[in-house]
């Protein structure tokens, strides 16, 4: 399997590069999730975004946007 092969490889620059790229991608994904959670209520409060916004599937609400 892939994980067994990776465990046998020496920790060279391409392996570190792969690890860093995956970690950086995960950081941006988590940042995006938390940023949306913090900024969403502020957008509703300021009137830019409403809790009754209709999406493309017909659902409504801040949590579905």
Image (cartoon, grey):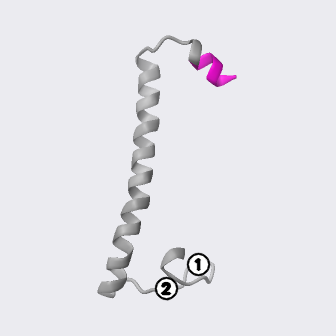
Picture coordinates of residue 51, whole percent (x, y): 46, 86
> The N terminus is located in which quarter?
top right
Give the residue number, with chain letter if any, for mark 2.
53
* Residue most extreme to the left: 46
Picture coordinates of residue 56, whole percent (x, y): 58, 78
Residue at 43%, 52% in the rendered image: 30
Q: Quadrant of residue 31?
A: bottom left
Q: Quadrant of residue 39?
A: bottom left
Judge the density around disc 2: few (<14), some (14-19), many (≥20) Cα neighbours within 10 Å. some
> Considering the numbered disc 2 on the image, is that residue within a helix, a strand or a loop?
loop
Picture layout, residue 65 above or below residue 8: below
Picture coordinates of residue 50, whole percent (x, y): 42, 86
Give the residue number, with chain letter if any, for mark 1.
56
> Considering the numbered disc 1 on the image, is that residue within a helix, a strand or a loop?
loop
The secondary structure making up most of the magenta span is: helix
Picture layout, residue 59 above or below residue 32: below
Real-space Cα separation, disc 2 to disc 1, in angstroms: 10 Å
Residue at 48%, 79% in the rendered image: 62
Query: Relative to residue 58, is residue 12 drawn left or right?
Result: left
Judge the density around disc 1: few (<14), some (14-19), many (≥20) Cα neighbours within 10 Å. few
Residue at 40%, 58% in the rendered image: 32
**In this rendering, does residue 48 appear at all?**
no
- Look at the image and give the residue range highlighted in magenta: 1-6
Please name which of the two marks, 2 or 1, marks the residue nearer to the observer: 2
Q: Does the magenta run of residues contain 64?
A: no
Picture layout, residue 1 above or below residue 61: above
Query: Relative to residue 64, is residue 2 drawn left or right?
Result: right
């Amino acid at each position: 399997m892939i994980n067994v092969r990776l465990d046998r490889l020496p920790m060279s620059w391409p392996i570190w590069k792969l690890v860093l790229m995956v970690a950086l991608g995960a950081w941006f994904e988590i940042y995006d999730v938390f940023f949306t959670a913090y900024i969403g209520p502020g957008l509703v409060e300021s009137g830019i975004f409403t809790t009754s916004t209709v999406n493309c599937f017909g659902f409504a609400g801040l949590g579905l946007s």
